[in-house]
Amino acid sequence: MAILSTLTREALPAEIQGLICQHSRARFRTLFQLCLVSRTFRAEAERVLYERVRLPKTKNIRAWCIALQSRPKLAVRVNDLILYMPPARLDGSDNMVDFRLLSNTLRLCGNLETLSIFPREGGELYSSAQAWILDGHTFRLRKLVNSYFRPMELWKFVNSQTALQYLSFTHEKRAIFRRHTTGPELSLMTLQASDMALREYSKSSLDHKVEVVKVNIHYRKYAMETETIVALGQFSKTLVGLKVTLTGIMTPELGRAMDRIVSLVALNLPNLKFLEIIDDSIMIGYPSSEQPLLGFPISLPRLERLMLRPSARLYVELSDSHGCKNAAERIMASLPSLKDFSLHILGQKAYAYPLTIDGQAGYVWKMKRLSNGVVSSMLVNMGDI
């Protein structure tokens, strides 16, 4: 630090000071110490410190609010804010958040573009009714991630954010979107939601300019993938990318969901360019099938990139690397427009390679169609990815 103090007295160029502050290894404590070197270092270090703010505890939130209230000019530097909120309490305990102070501080952050609000570890999801703290501010968000506020409490705020391009809301029991709306239209480029929230959004009167959808289909006692994928048809004119994650418990009655979803996508979203399906469901008492993965004609004439991670327990052919290669080559050949295809196998015995991840074997068949039409393929162990 003494060396830096000497250098700054000799007019270290501002560009060099900026590079030092922006170095990837410059952590919070380092930046804080740089603020003590000189005024010029402090200006650049503070810009980096306040540009992206992560507040994991109540005391951090309070200290940040007090700092910005005393120095409002710092607030305009805040671009990305991550809040970990404790439950609101009325007993005056240390965990209580001063929502009025937080609201007044957010009012100063006119350049805020990304806002993520989570409950602190151990807190209940979607339990707070204090979403009023987000109303009436001048910032125009491009990305909002929420798992803290109650869904319906957020509606007024979401509807006012006409510049919103990414909305992540994955609660399973309630949907944030109302069927009938008034006011400005909401146009999203990327929407991440549960299957229920997605279906509700598709019924709303909002502008459906959605380009990318990330949806979690959670299996309970019944399957809702048909209703969910059909609802996606509302976005067929603009949708280019879709990521589907399957969770919950998969029973024999629900069958092979990945095959059904691909056929539904081909029927309702024929113009899709990018598709990713990940099966993270828990299989219960379902034997492997001799039927191949996607062993039927697929009509997706514009699909360029495909990633599949099926449950290998459902397919006999995926029990070893040779069968996995045959499946990948068959799917690649059935989609002439496909440029990149990867087939991920995870959680099986190490039939091909002994390396494991958390005790589970995994490998990926990667295939690429070159400009001359030749298809190249490569087997990659997940331990090397």
Image: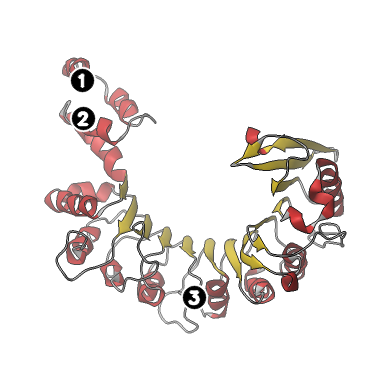
Count residues near mark 1 (Cα–Cα under 10 Å), then give few for <14, some for 14-19, many for 20+: few
Q: In screen coordinates, is 352 left or right of 219?
A: right
Identify which residue is drawn at 78% across, 50% down.
338
Q: Nearer the viewer, mark 1 or mark 3?
A: 3
Q: Earlier in the sequence, mark 2 or mark 3?
A: 2
Q: In screen coordinates, is 65 left or right of 277?
A: left
| Closest to the observer, 352 or 292 | 352
Q: Is disc 1 placed on a helix, strand or loop?
A: loop
In the image, what residue type sits under mark 3? Answer: Lys
Q: Is disc 3 placed on a helix, strand or loop?
A: loop
The scheme the figure's colours follow is secondary structure
Is residue 336 visible to us here?
no
Whole-percent x and y of residue 167? Answer: 47, 63
Q: How far separated are the C-alphas under marks 1 and 2?
A: 8 Å
In the image, what residue type sits under mark 2? Answer: Gln
Q: How far separated are the C-alphas under marks 2 and 3?
A: 46 Å
| Residue denoted by label 2 | 33
| Residue denoted by label 1 | 1
| Residue denoted by label 3 | 173
Count residues near mark 2 (Cα–Cα under 10 Å), then give few for <14, some for 14-19, many for 20+: few
How many numbered circles does the render carry? 3
Q: Earlier in the sequence, mark 1 or mark 2?
A: 1
The image quadrant where one finds the N terminus is: top left
Identify which residue is drawn at 77% across, 64% down.
259
Q: Report if the CB atoms under discs 1 and 3 are less than 8 Å apart.
A: no
